Amino acid sequence: MPSMFQRQSVGDFKYYVGISSLTQIASRADRVCVLNILGGESSDVTPVSHAYSGGNVVCGTAPGKGGAFLETAIGNIPVYNNVRDALAAGHRFNCGVVYLPPSAARDGVAELIRVNPELRKIFIVTEKISVHDAREIRAMGQQHGIDIFGANGLGVADSWNQVRIGGALGGDKPSDSLRPGSIAIFSNSGGFSTTIAQYLRMAGWGTTTVISSGKDVYIHYAAPEFAFALANDARSKAAVLYCEPGGYYEHDASFTKPVVACVVGRWKSKLTRPVGHAGAMAGGHDDAQAKERWFMEKFEVAELFTPENPVVSAKGAVVTNIAHIPAALTAVMRANATLPDFSAEGNLALKPWFGSDDGLDMPDALRLPVVEALAPYNEQVELLNTQIGGVVPRQTMKDASGASQMDAKTQVSSLHGTSMLRAATFSLESNVALALLHDAGGENDGKLIAPAVAAYVNLHARPELAAAQASREAGNAPNAVLAAAAAIVGPRRQREARDALKLIIERFHAAGLGMEFGASMSEDFDIALVSAGSHAGLTTASLDARAQSLLHGVAARGGKSVFLRWLQAQPGHPTEAAVLAAIAATLAWGPLSRKRISRSTAESLPWWLQLFGTLIGASADAALHAPEGFCGISQARLLGELSLGETAFVALLGRTPGKDDLFAFQTLVGLLLTNGPGSISAQGAKGAVSADGPEQPERVQLNKALIGFLTHTGYAHGGNGYEGIAYLVEQFKDSGLQDPSAKDHGINLQAIAAKAVAQYAKYKMQKKTQGSLDIAKLPGVNHPVFKDKPVNHDPREVFIAKLFDERGERNVFHDFYRVLVQELHAAGVSRNVYCVNIDAVIAALLLKMLWRPLQAGEIGASELETAAFTIFLYPRMLGCAAEVDDHLNRGRNMDTRTSYSQCMYVA
């Protein structure tokens, strides 16, 4: 076999280099053998390279697969078990490409060199080759006079010769990026090699040779060798280098032609371990800033090039952003009296075909202009822009959700990107909007949601109330009571409002109502532009009392709606369904325009608003519903004055809340909205949608889906909040506590906690003495995630405590829990300080609201338990409505079922 002494090295290198010009890197005369040709990456890349290069791959190897072929567009490439078999079959090649795993790369290189005396070049795509193996590969190449490229590179390409060897430079269509020109590229990054070529082409510069050097510790064909070959290539007038931290190769390179060096990775200088490509780490002298200085000295420039500060010399420029390379190169070449290779083809700046920044306060630099798409996409985009609302792809939604999720670390759930801690600071109206419109809405939304829901709270003389009361009197739990009412609010109850809403949306869209923020409540929009057409279902000749009541409620709150304004201008009197539809259109128009929600979601709003009002109303006894009002509150005040939180509070406790009670109530609602798609209640709602078939959304019964949620709550899920309340009542029953919010309540919490701990310690000892492992845990204490630290905290409890501290409010029950966990540890009952969990917070908040009526004898244990259960149902109703709507839009028919293979029979 030939040795390094038989093959003459070029230049004055102290080691073997066989390539004297970039023209020799990749030529039409080269013939290639690919090792592991049938591997995942090679089987995708090699056929493209072969076709682009005119058929330069003569054979490949894949142990055990001899006799196979790799299909390409210009013919099949034969596959052999090893290189020797390929040579024996008569194939001749001077280039080898290595796609082998890291542990096999060294042996693959050895095989190529050992059996093929005609070998001249090896291109190693494999990454993460050990330093030991890389040294041996280097030694073999030097000993036998072979140029090696890589490792961890994407090979090379020559735009003039239209040849690509060893990787995916130029992607699936190399000719799109690799237009012949006068600029050579040498890049540590394979992906950016193609990106830079594309940037240059857009600016009018073509390429000669493109080399992806790789960035393993050993770069076999490095910057000094490239600089030498560049100098001897008459085609190349200049070069672009893309450099990452690590190695001194660039320091030793001597350039005789203009160069733009892009140096990246300043952040890597802070690392103490390698990340990605092998790069410099803290403490070295080959980091990004060092390389910037090397090139600045070579090019005799004092600063980095930026578009705002275009510092260049005839020798070159240094940039730190690949987007600046074309401008820097053009400036450098201008200093050398050289024009671009061809006319600029455009630029790679972001050119959005779509854009919507309605309601977003952004700087001008971020307000990118929308441009017309290329044909045929422009016609498709134009058609899509006429579509009202968003559309999401359907998929199996078992145990999945596009509405909610839980952070496993913090245990904080979120709904449409809003954490439950933040939702705890919202009004009930805002949480309704969050659930159904995907954001909390604004002040005007609240002025419309409150009366729209309240209009259906008073159920006097309605079958919903009769069904709920019959269920209540039969001894059912609150969930079953509400389910009875929900069953009555079926599809026919909302059909007129849905049809009216469809008509309103279509007419206003055709009339050109804008998509800008606030368009739905515009007082300037010319309603005469909206087609009159048929008003069937929108107005009647006689006055509709319920419609008028709802209109007055909106007006009393100062709610604005262009749709209500138009509706009231039509001949006749608006119907209840039309008013509800106009309110829904107002709420949905913005989210529809921003494609935050689908058309189906918008058209379901009237049904949801009816259902929410009905279930809130059904939670109150029939005796509290009267012709003139609800719970002693007139219908006019209910629709025109009370917030939705106040209305729900009244339904729950039969009295209007003070400011502190209302805040506590709305905090509870926000906390309990969702616990993610895995909760039993969410599973029930999603299963109901899946069974109806979301692929035909008009057949999905929203009331049945809420019944699915309700039947999947119970005393263990939903009603279990009573355990914490009962525990607190037991501890404070003889304390003489009058006002749980009083700062000077006069209660010795330490003494109460000590007594509770002593009782619990005695109970545990008795259980252990009896040999029982069934030891009940204290409600509201400890958590399976927040444990094992000396002092543990549930972040949700910490947030709520801080929230109330900032308001200057006290809650003696919450304070007691914090004392209790300290006392448990002090008494040796717990090995560390347990956290006070979110269940304790919920119990403390609810009991704070109920303590006075409980002490006054106005409510008993049964009412207390009902209230604790119902306060869970209100917010979870909203969260499950969000799950229902999400599954309706995304899910597939029967997608929540469990496959037979995952089911078990238990004897």
Image (tube, rainbow, N blue to C red):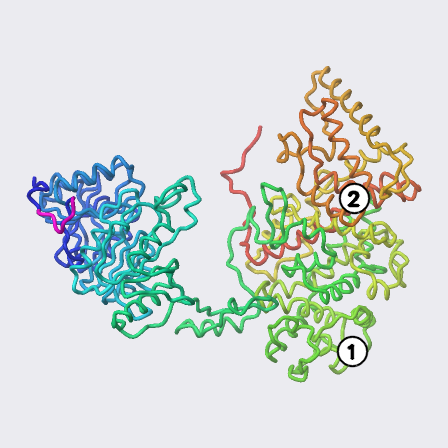
Given the image, on which type of amino acid does mark 1 rest?
Answer: His
Rendered image quadrant of residue 228: bottom left
Residue depicted at 69% across the width and 73% down the height: 521
Say what secondary structure mark 1 lies in: strand
Q: In which quarter of the image is the N terminus?
A: top left
Q: Given contact means CB atoms under 8 Å apart, are the residues at marks 1 and 2 in contact?
A: no
Magenta stretch: includes residue 9 = yes
Give the main secondary structure, helix, strand or loop, of the magenta stretch: loop
Region of the chain picked out in magenta, as a range? 8-14
Image side of residue 456 versus residue 623, left or right: left
Residue depicted at 19% across the width and 53% down the height: 76
Rendered image quadrant of residue 643: bottom right
Q: Quadrant of the C terminus?
A: top right
Of the pair 615 and 476, the residue shown nearer to us: 615
Most extreme residue toward the top is 769
Which residue was labeled with disc 2? 845
* Foreground disc of the pair 1, 2: 2
Say what secondary structure mark 2 lies in: helix
Of the pair 604 and 427, the residue shown nearer to us: 427
Residue depicted at 88% across the width and 61% down the height: 629
Magenta stretch: includes residue 729 = no
Which residue was labeled with disc 1? 573
Residue depicted at 60% across the width and 44% down the height: 678
Image side of residue 252 versus residue 282, left or right: left
